[in-house]
Image: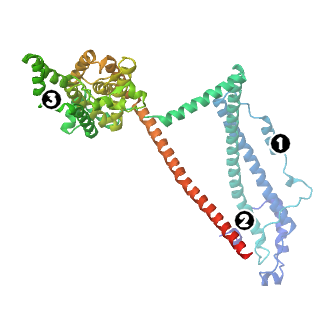
Amino acid sequence: MSASSDPTNLGPEEPASSSSEAKQPAQASTPTSSASASPSSAIPSPPLHQHQHQQRTRLTFEQMQQEARAKLGGMVRQQLEADRQQQQNQQQQPQPQDSEVTQTTTATPSPAYSTAAPGPTSPPSPAPPRASGATAPRQTTAAAQNTPTNSTTSSSSSTTSTSTSSTTSSVSDTAGATVAADDAQQQQQQEQQPPVSEWEETRQEWAEMWQRIRVRWRHFVERPLDPPSPQEHTRQAQPDGAAGAEATAEAGGGGVKRQAFVSRVVQLACVAVFVAQWAPLAHVLTGGAAAAQEAAAAAAGGSTTAAAAAGREVWLALLVASPPTPLTLSWQTDAISLSAGQYGSLLTSSLLHSGLVSLLVSLASLEETLPWLETLDGFMIMLLSYGMAGAVAGLTQLFLGGQATGIAGLAAALGTEVAVGVRCWRYTGGQLLPPTPACVALLGLSGLMAAYQPLVGTWGILGGILGGALSAVLAYDILYVMRVVIAVTILLGLGAWNLLSWLPRVLFRLVVGLVAVVWGTGVAVVQALRGV
C-alpha cells in the first residue's frame, strides 16, 4: 500500500525542513467538524511552508534531470561527430554554441533558490480530505519518495528524443550536402556544354516528333515476321527440312496438322481451266483425229506419212502448247485487256498452262508448296503469294519481254517455290530446305518453256521468281492494306446506300407536302367562290 497509510513508515526527512514539519502537525490537528462530516465540502488548501517544501523538492530533481540531459547530450554528440567523420570528411564540425548553452544552463542556478517570491505556479493536485493533521507530512514524504522515479523516466524519454532528433538532423545534413553537390555538378556540366541555338532546338523537337510518329505508325501497321507457333515447334523438332517435319508429323510427334483444303481448290481450278481450254478441240483429239488424218492424206495425194505427222502434231500440241480457244484468249494477259481496264486478267492468267506437261509438273510442285504456306501462314497468304507471282510474271512479260500476250501458270508455280524458300530462309535464320524432285523438274521445265514457248518467255519466268520473293516479304503488309481498302469500301458503300435510301424518302415527303398545300389552297379557293 502507499506510504501515507502506514503510521510507522515515515521515511527520511530533509534537515532544512524539520522545523516546518514540526509545526505542521499542530496546525493540521484542528480540522473543522464540517470537513470531517461532509466529504463533498470544499477541500482545505495546505499551508504555505508545505508548498515551498514541495516546490524545492521538485526543482531539485529538475536540476538533476538537466544535468543528466547535458551529460547524455554530450555523449551523443561525440558519437555523432565520430560517425560524421567516418562517413564524410567534408562535414562541418558541431557548433560550439550547443556546448556553451549546455554549460550555461548547468551553471546557472535554478530560479527556485532565489530569495524573491516565486512566480505564479500551477496549483497542486487536490488531495483527499484528511482525518487528522498527522497524515499531511506522511503524504508529503511519500510524494517526495515517488518523485525520483518519475524524473528518471522523464530524463530517459528526453534523452531518447534528443538522440533521435540529433540522428535526424545528421541524416538531413548529409542528404542536403549530397543534393547540393549533385546540383553543382549538373550546373558545371551545363556550363561546359556549348549553347544550343533556337534552330537546333526546333530541329530536335521536329526529329523527336517524327520519331514518335514513325513508332506509332509501325505499331499500327506492324505485322508478324516471326514464324507462327506450329512452324516454331516443327523447326525445333526437325531442323533438317520439310521431309523430316512431314515424317515427324506423320508419326504423330510434330504436333502440326497439315491443312490443304484451299490448296486442293487451287489445284482443281487449274485442272478445270485446262479442260476448258481444250474442250472446244475435243472432237479433234478423239473421233475427229481420224477424219483429219484422212483429209490431210487426200490433200497430200494419198501420203500416209503426212497424215501421221498431222496426228502427232495434235497430240504434241496437247502436251506443250496452249490452244487459241475463247477461254484462253479472254483469260490470258494482253495489252488490249489491260488497256480496257480488265485488270483481272493478271490473276486469271496464273491458272493457264501451256500443255499437259506444264500442268502436271506445276500440280506436283503446288502439292508441296501450297499446303506448306496454308498450314503455316494461312490460306490468305497462300493465295496472295500465288497471285502475286502470276501477276508480276504477266507484267514483266508484257512490259519487259515485248510480248503482247502471255500465260503465267508455270511462272506462278515457280514463284510459289521461291516464296517458300525465302520464308524458310527468314524463319530459320539462313537455312534452306533441300530441293525436292518436283522442284527440280519444275526448274528444268521452266528453262525449256522460257526458250521455246513465247507465251511463257524468259521475262515471264523471271517475273514469277521476283513476284514470289516479294510476296514472301510484303504479303502481310499487302493483306493489311487490302483489308483496310475493303473496309473503307464497305463503309463508303453503306454510306452511299444510306444516302440513296434517305433521298427518296425526303423527296417523297416534299412531294406529299406540296400536294397537300396545293390541294388545300384549291379547296379554300373553291369554298370562297361558292360563298361569294
Residue identifier under label 1? 104
Q: Secondary structure at mark 3?
A: helix
Left or right relative to 342: residue 192: right
The figure's colour scheme reads rainbow
Disc 3 or 2, which lies upstream in sequence?
Answer: 2
Does residue 455 show up?
Answer: yes
Distance from Cα at disc 3 to Cα at disc 1: 132 Å
Residue identifier under label 3? 285
Q: Position of residue 307 (x, y in %)?
A: 10, 20
Distance from Cα at disc 3 to Cα at disc 2: 138 Å
Mark 3, other Cα within 10 Å: few <14 / some 14–19 / many ≥20: some
Mark 2, other Cα within 10 Å: few <14 / some 14–19 / many ≥20: some
Labelled pair 3, 1 in contact (Cβ < 8 Å): no
Q: Amino acid at mark 3?
A: Leu
Left or right relative to 206: residue 310: left
Labelled pair 2, 1 in contact (Cβ < 8 Å): no
To which quarter of the image does residue 39 belong? bottom right
Residue identifier under label 2? 142
Q: Amino acid at mark 1?
A: Thr
223 vs 44: above or below = above
Q: Position of residue 46 (x, y in %)?
A: 83, 70
Q: Secondary structure at mark 2?
A: helix
Left or right relative to 131: residue 307: left
Disc 3 or 1, which lies upstream in sequence?
Answer: 1
329 vs 119: above or below = above
Q: Amino acid at mark 2?
A: Ala
